[in-house]
Amino acid sequence: NAGVTQTPKFRVLKTGQSMTLLCAQDMNHEYMYWYRQDPGMGLRLIHYSVGEGTTAKGEVPDGYNVSRLKKQNFLLGLESAAPSQTSVYFCASRTSGGFGGELFFGEGSRLTVL
Amino acid sequence: SQQGEEDPQALSIQEGENATMNCSYKTSINNLQWYRQNSGRGLVHLILIRSNEREKHSGRLRVTLDTSKKSSSLLITASRAADTASYFCATDANYGQNFVFGPGTRLSVLP
């Protein structure tokens, strides 16, 4: 059982470069999320999706774009990376229904922007 | 603004002792969850408590919820070195579509 898989695990970018983080889940979950984690800040929601073809903004969406073309994949894009986007990014997924439910997390993608 | 705030920010105890972490939140919730994160890893779900529950147990974990005080506590009994990790509370938001996490409590269990 792979669960939630994030690629790449590590990446170094120069300011202004673009990149895409891929999240894949094999649990047939409807909901998927992208969070960033910075020291002392906990996890902050960037974007999320409640189903294939849908996306919504979270708490800190600026500078990021997302797409959910397939139910199992949730892509996070940085069009023009900035040093402020240096962070650890986590993808998570869960089943739909009810108010909340257990989130399943990937192992994280550590991004450094120089 | 963050919904949940854990207290203390860091906690260091001896193996065998109990560890208590607290979480406060600001708005009404439907449920509250606790997660653990080992260093360099993703978060792992520990326990979920619903707003109509006051206490819940899972193994060595005991979670309480006081909706009148907008607070929750996580108790880990008979701690082990393997319990060393960061612990986060998360509350549901936006009609249950997403979750808000606190900054976490770093627990160190010394052998």
Image: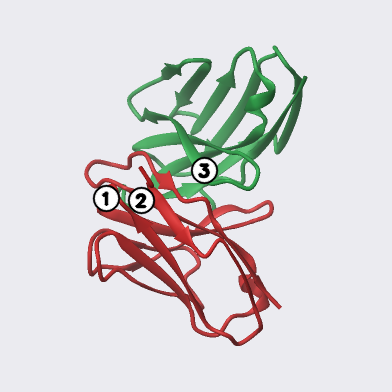
Q: Which mark is residue A29?
A: 1
> Marks 1 and 2: in contact by CB < 8 Å?
yes
Chain ID, red in image = A
Q: Chain of mark 3?
A: B
Q: Using residue A101 as the reference point, say whether residue A9 is left or right of it.
A: right
Q: CA distance from mark 1 to mark 3?
A: 17 Å
Residue at 54% of width from left, 52% of height from top?
Answer: B2
Kind of residue sitting beneath label 3: Leu
Residue at image mark 3: B43
Of residue B77 and residue B101, the one placed in the foreground of this image is B77
Q: Secondary structure at mark 1?
A: loop
Q: Chain of mark 1?
A: A
Q: Are marks 3 and 2 on the same chain?
A: no
Q: Quadrant of the N terminus of chain A?
A: top left
Coloring scheme of the render? by chain
Chain ID, green in image = B
Question: Picture coordinates of residue B84 (x, y %)?
Answer: 67, 30
Residue at image mark 2: A93
Q: Which mark is residue B39?
A: none
Q: Residues within 10 Å of mark 3 (few under 14, many from 20)?
A: many
Q: Residues within 10 Å of mark 1 (few under 14, many from 20)?
A: some
